[in-house]
Image (cartoon, rainbow, N blue to C red):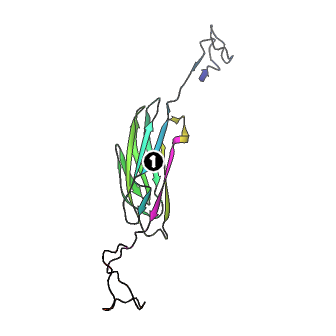
């Protein structure tokens, strides 16, 4: 509630007394201001729970405004984890860009009940010193008062494995245990490694 009152006058006022705090007089008024309220939330999924180095990993971010009002200037920030290389970011509305490993999507307005998605493609790299997991977190915000900030952040975890080497050649019985295939040693047919 915002209130205002005349506190002093140069001439006499016949029907009110300035600065007396009586709300029924015509020298005072108030207005109730209700801020616009939204509930923007974000979820995040990965195309796989395990990916190999050099493979493509797709993150899908879904932003939803549960209202009751329209959310304006909806923005998503996704700081990519170490050990991945950015490929692309495609929003279903608005625009997205990437700088120094941070993807920023500007989605504009989401009406109550409306959703938008952002698809981010990355490639795990060998800069990850060892195989392991990558954690990726994204956050959403808007201009309006958000009644539920608990759903403004989403995280997904993906295991990264190195590509297993392939083996090609012959399988044989190494009779003299020297590790070299010799003409006197016989091959083993239909062996599976």
Residue pictured at 67% horizontal, 18% vertical: 19
Of the 4 image quadrants, the one containing the C terminus is: bottom left
Instruction: Answer with left or right where residue 131 lies relative to residue 5.
Output: left
Using the image as rendered, state which of residue 28 and residue 48 is in the foreground.
48
Q: Magenta residues, as a range?
A: 151-170
Residue 190 position, x and y percent, is 31, 74
Q: Secondary structure at mark 1?
A: strand
Residue 66 position, x and y percent, is 46, 33
Any part of residue 143 in sight = no
The stretch drawn in magenta includes residue 88 = no
Q: Residues within 10 Å of mark 1 (few under 14, many from 20)?
A: many
Relative to 87, residue 17 above or below: above
Of the 4 image quadrants, the one containing the N terminus is: top right
Residue under label 1 = 44
Instruction: Answer with left or right where residue 96 lies relative to residue 155.
Output: left
Residue 170 position, x and y percent, is 32, 81
The stretch drawn in magenta includes residue 156 = yes
Using the image as rendered, state which of residue 146 and residue 32 is in the foreground.
146
Instruction: Answer with left or right where residue 12 lies relative to residue 145.
Output: right
Any part of residue 29 in sight = yes
Relative to 52, residue 17 above or below: above
């Amino acid at each position: 509630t915002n209130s205002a009152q005349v506190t002093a006058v140069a001439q006499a006022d016949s029907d009110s007394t300035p600065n007396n705090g009586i709300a029924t007089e015509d020298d005072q008024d108030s207005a109730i201001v209700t801020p616009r309220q939204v509930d923007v939330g974000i979820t995040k999924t990965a195309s796989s729970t395990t990916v190999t180095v050099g493979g493509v990993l797709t993150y899908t971010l879904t932003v939803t405004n549960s209202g009751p009002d329209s959310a304006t200037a909806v923005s998503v920030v996704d700081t990519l984890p170490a050990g991945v290389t950015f490929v692309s970011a495609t929003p279903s509305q608005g625009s997205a860009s990437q700088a120094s490993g941070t993807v920023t999507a500007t989605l504009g307005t989401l009406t109550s009940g409306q959703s938008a998605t952002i698809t981010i493609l990355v490639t795990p790299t060998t800069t990850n010193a060892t195989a392991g997991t990558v954690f990726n977190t994204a956050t959403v915000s808007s201009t309006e008062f958000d009644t539920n900030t608990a759903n403004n952040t989403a995280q997904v975890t993906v295991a990264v494995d190195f590509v297993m080497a392939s083996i090609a050649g012959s399988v044989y019985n190494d009779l003299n245990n020297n590790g070299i295939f010799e003409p006197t040693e016989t091959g083993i047919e239909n062996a599976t490694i």
